[in-house]
Amino acid sequence: MIMIRRAVPQDAEQIESLYEQLERDAVTYQPQHFVISPAGARSEQLLSMIGSETQTMFAAEEDGEVVGFAHVVLHMAKAFSCLKPQSNIYLQDLVVAPEYRGKGIGTLLLNAAKEYGRENGAEFFRTQVFPMNADGLRFYRRNGFEVTMLTIECPL
């Protein structure tokens, strides 16, 4: 049975392994922006966010094994006169091990993140997905997300 909980330092090695898959996908989609992290770098980042007041990581565990995670960042309202004073949560990363996909684990992780947002007074939940990641787009739409803005860029 899958259990969703906050990540702890002892999860670092398993989460590091999951991040490798996420980073391989990112390099495939946008090699101009992404590289594979050096060994141990993601574990250090996990340790720095545990206990943070503005971010957290949820782990999906089955039989003592971390099979997925969601990294969520709390963004407070920006002080610009044209913006409504709304805080939000941002899904920095979400990954489920390939052999566990399609079993609702991603949705459980998103639901934990949504609850974290509500507990912290966030008005909405935001993330990004690669436009060519059709499975990811379907997943997020099934979970209540919709396109509200497009990111565009050009090289300099």
Image: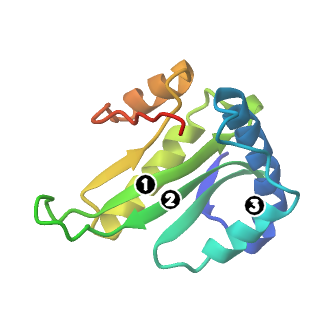
* Residue on which the image places disc 2: 72
Looking at the picture, how far across and down is residue 43, in whole percent? 78, 65
**Res. 64 visible in picture:** no
Where on the picture, by quarter, is residue 86?
Answer: bottom left
**Residue at the farthest right position:** 39
* Residue on which the image places disc 3: 42
What amino acid does circle 3 point to?
Arg
What amino acid does circle 1 point to?
Tyr
Disc 2, SS: strand
**Looking at the image, is 69 positioned above or below residue 74?**
above
Q: Is disc 3 surrounded by few (<14), some (14 to 19) or many (20+) residues within 10 Å?
A: some
**Looking at the image, is 55 positioned above or below residue 15?**
below
* Front of the two marks 2 and 3: 3
Q: Is residue 65 left or right of residue 31?
A: right
Q: CA distance from mark 2 to mark 3?
A: 15 Å
Q: CA distance from mark 3 to mark 1?
A: 18 Å
Q: Are marks 2 and 3 in contact (CB under 8 Å)?
A: no
Q: Is residue 103 left or right of residue 16?
A: left
* Residue on which the image places disc 1: 90
Disc 1, SS: strand
Q: Residue at 70% x, 68% y: name it.
A: 45
Q: Quadrant of the N terminus?
A: top right
Looking at the picture, how far across and down is residue 148, in whole percent? 27, 35
Disc 3, SS: helix
What amino acid does circle 2 point to?
Val
Q: Are marks 1 and 2 in contact (CB under 8 Å)?
A: yes
First reached walking from the N terminus: tag 1 or tag 2: 2
